[in-house]
Image (cartoon, helix red, strand yellow):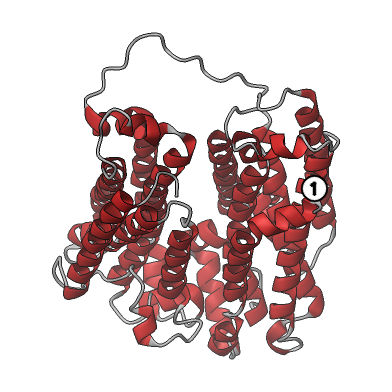
Amino acid sequence: MTLARLLIRRHRGWTLAWVGVIGLLCMTFSSYAGAYSTTQARELAVEAAQQTAASTLLYGRLESPGTPAQIFAWEIGAFLTLLAGVCGVLLAARLSRATEEDGTLELIRSCGVRPVTPHLATWGYLGGVASVLALCVTLIVGRHAPLDGVTWSGSVTLGATVGVTFLALAAATVLIAQVLPSAGQARAAGLGILAISFAQRAFGDLRGIPGIASWSPLGLRGAVGPMTDDRLTPLLMALSCAGLVAVTATALALRREYAASLLPARPAADRRLRIDGLGGLWWRLHGAGLTAWVAVGAVLVPLFVAMGSGVVDSASRGDLSGGFLAEQMAGTEPVEAYLSYLGTVAALVVSVYAALTVLRAATEEHSGLSETVRGTGIAPERPLATAAAWAALGSFVGLLAAGVMSAWVAPAVLSGPHVAESAVRHLVGQWPGVAALVGVATAVVGLRSTAGALVWVGYGGSAVLVLLGSLLHAPTWLIDASVFGHVPSVGWISAAQLVLLAVGALGCAVGLTGIRHRDLAC
């Protein structure tokens, strides 16, 4: 078996899941074609987008005349490039540093292959995934040509932008993986680069400085202008930069020792750890990560609340006639709708922390930490129970912190009765959905530690339904099956939230029972 076939067999399920999500996003184009079928609707959309700071922060600048294809590339294109970037970071970490940690690269090298061969196979796989993403976007969007402003040249540049964005952030992650001593640190650094890229693009667009925005990987879409200018020069420049980074990363990898890093690992402290129980051990190992998640949420969510007045005003005037944001703002009072939308997005982010925390229990089974802990006489289910408890508690604290900070900011920028209370309710009210996801993750890990991908399938399905269900014309009952978006319009608790809490409790019970009846790391 060749290395290329080995990589495909090991990562095909994970890769196809990401390609499927991006393909679903592309299939929402028909909703844009219907929403912006008239000149008046397009003019209102362009005016609202150009005058709303929140829209510019999220999606960048929208150029005139605002055809359905332009609006799609502006709004959904932002999500396509962001998802491609996240996929690139995670996949690059899996293919580089993680293969050294789990022994895969050592096994491959023991077969007599040249040191450079695994790295070439990694770049070949990343290039293949980028090509598949580009082709998927091009074909799904291009089939609408020549209607609604869609052109094949615009479809090709949009697809190429998604593929090159994926490749650029993947290359940056592989490079940083040569410097840092662990896959987790490389993954976190890659996501940090993604966040900096988003901030750079947003700052450049808000300040009207294209030079700053266009030199960001996530600003490549604005520099290329799919469906508007279809510039090829920024694509070629970005691809050249990604290639240069790839060559540099490969050279650094060949110059360092196996499983080593250019930046030495922090030496262990000689003093004895004073830890009281599994909860204290968990906090010692992962408390810094929880603090970072809470701090980021407490800053970013109020920031979007502060920039939401333009969106609320546009919705009140009826300027949001279609598209993703209009669907999120439909059906209720604009302030409530906007806070509900932010609450859903915050819950999606917090759920990533919750899922990772529970899945870390499975990782620790395979790394040997759980074996050491259980060797002290700890019951088999207690490490998983501790992870689930911290996931539930940490997600609640994160949503509460974001809610309190938003309640402080919202009355100053959003008009209406009980705005502060609504901000807290729409954020904290999403916690039962996160708790349900914690229960599902606990059940999956408890029954089979190697089935963690099922957790992300459930998470991804719920996210797609709550955000894109209406654009995909999904039936109402299917959208309601998502664990998110069940905050009541009046009051603090609803029957749906009680059901979600019951699902979370049942999932935890199933997982904690199941782990007592299976072997370690099975």
Tally of marks: 1
The residue at 31%/17% (across/down) is: 273
- Packing grade of label 1 (10 A; few <14, some 14-19, many >=20) is some
The residue at 33%/58% (across/down) is: 443
Residue 125 falls left or right of residue 47? right
Q: Nearer the viewer, residue 311 or 504?
A: 504
For residue 401, say whether it is visible: yes
The residue at 69%/59% (across/down) is: 9
| Label 1 secondary element | helix
Q: Nearer the viewer, residue 522 or 496?
A: 522
Q: Residue furthest top?
A: 270
Kindly indicate the quadrant of the structure image that contains residue 470.
bottom left
**Vertical placement of residue 503 versus 98, above or below:** below
User: What is the x, y in percent for residue 84?
Assistant: 63, 58
User: What is the x, y in percent for residue 483?
Assistant: 33, 68
**Vertical placement of residue 515 versus 470, above or below:** above
Residue 464 falls left or right of residue 376? right
For residue 412, say whether it is visible: no
User: What is the x, y in percent for residue 21?
Assistant: 57, 69
Q: Nearer the viewer, residue 246 or 420?
A: 246
Kindly indicate the quadrant of the structure image that contains residue 480.
bottom left
Quadrant (top left, top right, bottom left, bottom right) of the N terminus: bottom right
Q: Which residue is mark 1?
A: 121
The residue at 81%/52% (across/down) is: 2
Residue 413 falls left or right of residue 65? left
User: What is the x, y in percent for residue 425?
Assistant: 21, 61
Q: Nearer the viewer, residue 4 or 18?
A: 4
Kindly indicate the quadrant of the structure image that contains residue 490.
bottom left
**Vertical placement of residue 289 versus 474, above or below:** above
Q: Amino acid at mark 1?
A: Ala
**Vertical placement of residue 460 versus 372, above or below:** below
